[in-house]
Amino acid sequence: MDTAKLGTESVVVRNQAVLGEAPIWDARTQNLVWVDIIVETVHFFDPVANKDRAVAVGEPVGSVATSGGISALTPSGCLDVLVRMEIDNSRRRITTTPSLAMLICSISTWQPSPLEIVST
Amino acid sequence: MNGLLARSLEFDDMAMPDLHPSGSIVPIVLALCEWCGAPGRDLLSAIAIGLELCLRLGRAGVDQATRMSRFLQRGQDATAICGCIAGAAVAARLLGLDSSGIANAIGIAVSFASGSLEGNRSGGTIKRFQSGWAAKSAIQAAMLAKYGVEGPTQALEGRYGFYHCFVDGQFDETSLVEGLGHTWQISDLRFKPYPSNYYTHTGIDAALALRKKGLRVDEIVSAELAVATSMLHTVGEPLDRKQAPKSTYEAKFSAPYAVASALIGGSGLGLGINDFSDEMLGDPARRTLMRKVSVIAAARCDSIFPDQAPSILSVRTANGKTLIEEAMINRGSAGRPLSDHELSTKFSENCAGGLAPSRVDALRELIDRIEEADDLSEIVRIFEAVSG
C-alpha cells in the first residue's frame, strides 16, 4: 500500500450518513455513487458541481451495481434507482406505485369541487 | 358485459384528449357494490375515485410540450388500458385491501392492461369489447391481490413497468399523485350529446347550426370540415372510407357521415341513436351527401385542441355562396354544459330500447336519490325484472 498517497486523501462528500457504504465510481454519469443503508437512500455525488443528491429507495439498501443503469441491492432484489439521471423528480419516481396506493387508501370520500357544482 | 354495452354506442363520457373512463369504472363499482351490499354513498365515492385515477393515469402520459396523448399517438386505447389499472385500484379498495394490497392490484392489472384504437380507423367491432375487458381484468386483478398474488413494487414507474411499456417511460409523476383526494380532475369530465366519436361532435353542431339557419340539402355542392390534426386521423382518414362507411359502427367515426346526417336532421339532442341505424346508413340521400364532405386539418383548431375538439364547417352552395359555421367549444363541456332537461332526454333515449317508460321514470328517481340508498337492491330489481 502506498502510504504516501494515503496521506493526501481528503473528504470529498461531507454528509452526515447514518451508515454509509459501498462507494463506487460510475463512469457513465461521472458520479460517485454510495448508499446509506439505514436511511434507505442511494447517493450521487457530482464532483464537478460539488453536489450530492440522495434518492429514497424505500427499503434498506446494501449496495449498488452499475450495469447499464444504477441498481440498488435490497431485500426485494434489484431496484432501478436512476435510469435517467437527468430527470429532476427521480427521487419520487421510484416510489410512484406504493405512493399512489397509499394515497388511494387514504381518500376518505369524494366532495364535489366548486367547478363541478357550477358545471352541473 | 356492462362495460361492453357502455362502449358500444359511443355515447359514454369524455375526458380530453382521449379518455372515456365511466365505461369501465362504473360497471366495476356497480358490480362490487351490489356484491358487497354497499350503500349508495360508497358507490358514488368509489366511482369518483376510479374516474379520477383513470384520468390521472392517462393524463400523466400527455406530452406537456405538444399537449398530445402519447397513448393516442401510439394507437393505444388509454380508456381501456388506464381503466383496467384504475379499476383494479378502486376494486381493491372496495374489497377492503390495504395500501399494499392496492399496490399489488395495480401491479397485476399492469400485466392485464390492453387495447388498440385501430378500430377507429379501419373498422371491426372489437374495440367496444375493450372497456368490458378492462372491467373484467380489473376485478380479476383485485381478487388475485386479495388472495395473495403480488405485483411488481415498481409496476408503474420501473424500467420494465407500465409507462415504459406503453409510452417509452415518458410520464409526469407529479400530475399522477399530486393533490389526489383533494383536487379532482373529474370536474373536466364531459357528457356526450351525440352517440358518435367525440371528434365528430363540433362538426355536427356546425351542421345543425347551418340547417337551423335555413340551409337545404339540395343547395349543397360541397362541404369542407376543418378540424385539429389529431381529430383528422380518427374521423377524416382515410377519406374515401370515411365517405362510405361500411357499418353503423364505422359511421360513428366518420365526420362525413356525421355532418351529412346533421345537415339532413336527426333525433335526440340533434343526432340520436336511431340516426346511426342500418336504414340510415343505406339511405341514398345520406350516402350522396357524405361523399360531398371532405375533412382537413386547420392550425386554428390545432391551437385549441385538446382543451376542445373544434370544427369549422364551410359549405359551398349551388348559387355560388360559401357559408362558414364555427363550433369551437364542445357541447357538454364545462364551457357549454348540457341542461338537466337535455341530460334527462339522453337518459330516456338510452333506456327506451330496454325499459318501459314507467320503469325509466322509477330508475331515474332511484338514481337521483342514490346517495341516500342503503344498498343497490332496488336498482338491481328493475333490471332483474327486464332480464327475467
Image: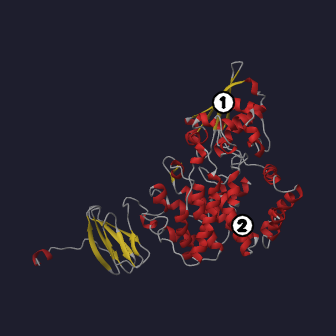
In the picture as drawn, the residue positioned furthest to the right comes out as B358
Residues packed near mark 1 inside 10 Å, few (<14), some (14 to 19) or many (20 plus): some
Residue B258 percent across, percent down from the top left:
69, 38
Crowd band around label 2 with a 10 angstrom C-alpha radius: few (<14), some (14–19), many (20+): many
**Which residue in the structure is indicated by mark 2?**
B30
In terms of secondary structure, where does tag 1 sit? loop
The subunit carrying tag 2 is B
Which of A39/A10 is in front? A39
For badge 1, the amino acid type reads Arg
Residue for point 80% across, 54% down: B351
Q: Decide which of B357, A65 is in the foreground and name it.
A: B357
Q: Which mark is residue B291?
A: 1
Q: At label 2, which amino acid type do we have?
A: Leu
The N terminus of chain B lies in quadrant: bottom right
Q: Nearer the viewer, residue A101 or B37?
A: B37
Q: Is residue B71 above or below residue B140?
A: above
Residues flagged by tags 2 and 1 on a common chain: yes
Q: Percent from the top left, x then y, of residue B212?
A: 78, 33
Q: Are marks 2 and 1 in contact (CB under 8 Å)?
A: no
